Amino acid sequence: MPFQILIVGGGIAGLTAAIALRAPGRQITILEQSRLLSEVGAAISLQPNASRILEESWCMGAALKVAGGIVDEGFRIYNADGQLVNTIPLLSKTEYGGDRIMYHRQDLHKALKEAATTEDRSGLPTNIRTAARVISCDCEAGTVFLESGEQLYADLIVGADGIHSVIRGNVLDGHVKTVPTGLSAYRFMVPTSVLESHAAKFCEHIKPREPFTSMMVAHSCRLIMGPARECNTYSVVGLIPDERMNEDPDKKQSWTSVGDLSQMLETFKDFPEWVKECFKLVEKDLGLWQLRDIDPLTAWTRGRAILIGDAAHAMLPTQGQGASQTVEDAEALGAFLSDVEDTPSKETIKQRLQNVFECRYDRASLIQRYSREAARPGTEKGSKEVKMKPDEFMDYNCMYPGAREWHRRHQQEIASF
Ligand SMILES: Cc1cc2nc3c(=O)[nH]c(=O)nc-3n(C[C@H](O)[C@H](O)[C@H](O)COP(=O)(O)OP(=O)(O)OC[C@H]3O[C@@H](n4cnc5c(N)ncnc54)[C@H](O)[C@@H]3O)c2cc1C
């Protein structure tokens, strides 16, 4: 019998777990509730700690080239008057072992799906079952229950079902509340050619074909902007406190909720006219979501099941580490289960999942905390001087040598303490 693995959720966590776990003698199935037809149109960054894993550990360099990612060269910081006040170059690949790369979510998702399902990698291709909504699982028995009434068995269950995870309820024996962080975010993308023909002043200031993340920072609101798709698309995210927003935050809790342009213009009314030129180019697809995270959980594993990605440690997007921490989880699963073959006993699975948890928990929890800290107001009240430092936690976040080495160093520290 092959080693049976069921992954609940086909987002970045589910797909990267499938890539990391692929090996001969294993059958991997992803159960995804949606039809996987409409990944949201938004930019997403992979940080050096994650892009190194994709390129070196999973040999995805060629596939990622096709995905059209932009290697980010640094941060340009503007104050609320629109003046460029600081440029922070990013450390190079030599220092971090990888680049910070901006993708369009649809392109990254497609490349990951291809790597999980292709015949050209080791092990059987992953079977992705769409329109397969999971309602619960029995972690000890390894049974997964679908909304359709079907039951499936696995040696290993990976709960990669996002911030509102149902598997989490079974691992922890109870519901975990998501925490409103007091922040919401508008997001939209504009073709760069449209910006160039209709927002000349914006392009004079921001230069949207240059590979930089530009941030315009006021006390409580900020814009985070950058190119994707080989600089042919430009992404804008507007972070705002719920109380400053002119929309109902409780109605905007999904990544796919729609925002209102006139309300967005009202919220950002004090920002320079030239930056608002680009807001006016949004024809459709203005997204708005209330940012929630979760507090660190007491456990990620139980019996044959483990939580990864947003299900385990949903965090604010202020450091762009959500997807990257997910990639680290997947790499840890691959590393600690690499020599598990045939039909593993429950004891073996439990032990290996415990190793993953021990390796990942402190680091992911700390980065959750840093992401909350990075959401602090960007200036003192009433001041235009920008205090926010987008590279504040970069060294800790990005210098990651992979799960086994990280675990070894951690054990050494404990031994010497
Ligand atoms: C539009 C958008 C923009 C983002 N931008 C950034 C960013 O710039 N920087 C950053 O750090 N993070 C960002 N994030 C968050 C980041 O993508 C996540 O932190 C990371 O990808 C981990 O995602 P995940 O796979 O754990 O969860 P998700 O992406 O939420 O995927 C979960 C998957 O599970 C499926 N699912 C849920 N419940 C069930 C069920 N019961 N049965 C079957 N399937 C189920 C869902 O349909 C979904 O496909 C963004 C997320 C979105 C959606």
Image (cartoon, rainbow, N blue to C red):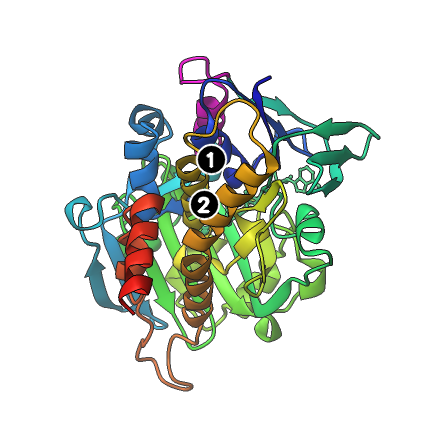
In this view, 236 is above or below 86: above
Q: Earlier in the sequence, mark 2 or mark 1?
A: 1
Q: Which residue is mark 2?
A: 329
2 vs 1, front mark: 2
Q: Are marks 2 and 1 in contact (CB under 8 Å)?
A: yes
Q: Is residue 115 magenta?
A: yes
Residue drawn at (70%, 28%), measured in percent from left and top?
153
Question: Looking at numbered disc 2 in the image, what kind of residue is underneath it?
Answer: Asp
Residue 257 located left or right of residue 98: right
* Residue 1: assigned label: none
Query: Where in the figure is residue 356, as x and y percent of width and height?
Result: 46, 47
Question: Looking at numbered disc 1 in the image, what kind of residue is underneath it?
Answer: Thr
* Residue 16: assigned label: 1
Residue 208 seen in render: no
Using the image as rendered, state which of residue 303 and residue 238 is in the foreground: 303
| Residue range of the region highlighted in magenta in the rendering | 108-124
Residue 96 seen in render: yes
Dot 1 crowding, Cα within 10 Å, few <14, some 14–19, many 20+: many
Residue 285 located left or right of residue 274: right
Residue drawn at (67%, 58%), measured in percent from left and top?
252
**Residue 193 picture quarter:** top left
